[in-house]
């Protein structure tokens, strides 16, 4: 018999038949929920529904297959069904559920997912995006270490209302994924954390006390880029460059065509690019100091706020 578990992820009340230790749990039973996660009995022939690709869109359902792990079905932004393989690792099942599946579900609900981390500075959210290995999670963790809460890691849920008001970011779950070298740079001990499935040097780091649980307006986007330069530098992108950055760093943007959401995504990022500053933060490949970059970003934000304040006088 399945037990029912209740969570709050990306501003959504979720009823789940699978335990999600990474997520923020809602205690007690809630009568209304936005998303239901179902768990089918294990079966061997999950792959029979696919040929070569691991993604399919069929009759309103987005179908996602992870070999030797599970078959996922995401429908209407409200239902996720998981059919695991016999003996599949539960941590790996959750890894894809909380990543790709939630990203697709957000798209189906009209919520733009960006790929990166989000931190809270002076009551507003700043998104940190970048290519894999750029150091965005490390930078976000450094923010948290000096007192700026983290709102999300990996998937940033950006909700744009129908009017012209600011975009809103909703918190994900109080956990980060950090490489061992990042943990050492931040002055933490890797032996205090569990490794992520089959990634010996990448760890799941709980952030209960540095996690911000309420939605806040998105105030800017910072693209972190590695460069062969001696010192870090930061500059503002123009609107067209900002649009490109938002497109490249839309979470799982390669799936938009399957979901027939290319136009919606373009309209969303075009609106963001017209409303928000987008910056490029160039950090040296060698000698990367996350705490130094934190100082640079905070100084820039405070400087921009002073300029805006004077403009309003």
Image: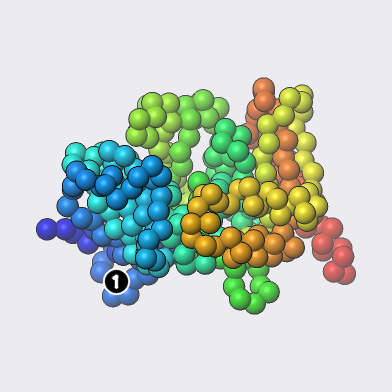
| Mark 1 burial class by Cα count in 10 Å: few <14, some 14-19, many 20+ | few
Q: Which residue is mark 1?
A: 30
| Farthest-out residue, bottom | 163
Q: Quadrant of residue 275?
A: bottom right
| Residue 116 in the image: above or below residue 228 | below
Location of residue 172 in the rendering, given as x and y in whole percent from the top left corner: 46, 55
Location of residue 148 in the rendering, given as x and y in whole percent from the top left corner: 58, 48
SS for dot 1: loop
At a point 40% along the width and 53% down the height, the residue shown is 56
Q: Is residue 160 left or right of residue 310?
A: left
Residue 86 shows in this picture: yes
Location of residue 116 in the rendering, given as x and y in whole percent from the top left corner: 56, 46
At a point 40% along the width and 38% down the height, the residue shown is 204
Location of residue 298 in the rendering, given as x and y in whole percent from the top left corner: 71, 46
At a point 61% along the width and 64% down the height, the residue shown is 263
155 and 295: which one is in front?
155
307 and 167: which one is in front?
167
Q: Is residue 99 left or right of residue 197?
A: right
Q: Is residue 267 left or right of residue 51?
A: right
253 and 218: which one is in front?
253
Looking at the picture, the colour scheme in use is rainbow
Residue 98 shows in this picture: no
Q: Is residue 249 left or right of residue 79?
A: right
| Residue 132 in the image: above or below residue 164 | above
At a point 73% along the width and 25% down the height, the residue shown is 228
Task: Count up the numbered dots.
Answer: 1
| Farthest-out residue, front | 51
Image quadrant holding the N terminus, namely bottom left
């Amino acid at each position: 018999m399945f037990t029912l578990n209740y969570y709050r992820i990306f501003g959504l009340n979720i009823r789940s038949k699978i335990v999600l230790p990474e997520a923020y749990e809602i205690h007690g039973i809630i009568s209304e929920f936005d998303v239901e996660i179902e768990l089918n009995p294990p079966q061997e022939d999950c792959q029979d529904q696919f040929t070569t690709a691991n993604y399919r869109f069929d009759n309103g359902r987005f179908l996602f297959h992870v070999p030797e792990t599970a078959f996922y079905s995401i429908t209407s932004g409200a239902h996720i069904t998981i059919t695991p393989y016999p003996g599949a690792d539960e941590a790996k099942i959750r890894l894809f559920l909380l990543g790709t599946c939630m990203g697709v579900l957000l798209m189906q609900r009209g919520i733009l997912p960006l790929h990166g981390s989000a931190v809270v500075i002076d009551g507003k959210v700043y998104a940190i995006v970048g290519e894999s290995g750029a150091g965005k999670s490390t930078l976000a963790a450094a923010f948290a270490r000096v007192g700026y809460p983290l709102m999300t890691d990996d998937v940033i849920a950006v909700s744009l209302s129908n009017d012209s008001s600011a975009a809103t970011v909703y918190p994900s779950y109080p956990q980060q994924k950090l490489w061992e070298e990042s943990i050492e740079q931040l002055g933490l001990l890797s032996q205090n954390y569990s490794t992520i499935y089959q990634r010996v040097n990448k760890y799941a780091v709980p952030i209960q006390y540095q996690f911000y649980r309420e939605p806040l307006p998105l105030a800017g986007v910072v693209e972190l880029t590695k460069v062969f330069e001696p010192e870090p530098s930061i500059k503002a992108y123009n609107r067209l460059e900002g649009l490109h950055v938002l497109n490249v760093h839309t979470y799982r943007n390669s799936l938009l065509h399957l979901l027939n959401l290319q136009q919606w995504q373009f309209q969303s990022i075009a609106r963001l690019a017209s409303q928000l500053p987008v910056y490029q933060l160039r950090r040296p490949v060698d000698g990367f100091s996350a705490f130094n970059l934190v100082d640079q970003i905070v100084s820039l934000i405070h400087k921009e706020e002073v300029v805006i304040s004077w403009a309003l006088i």
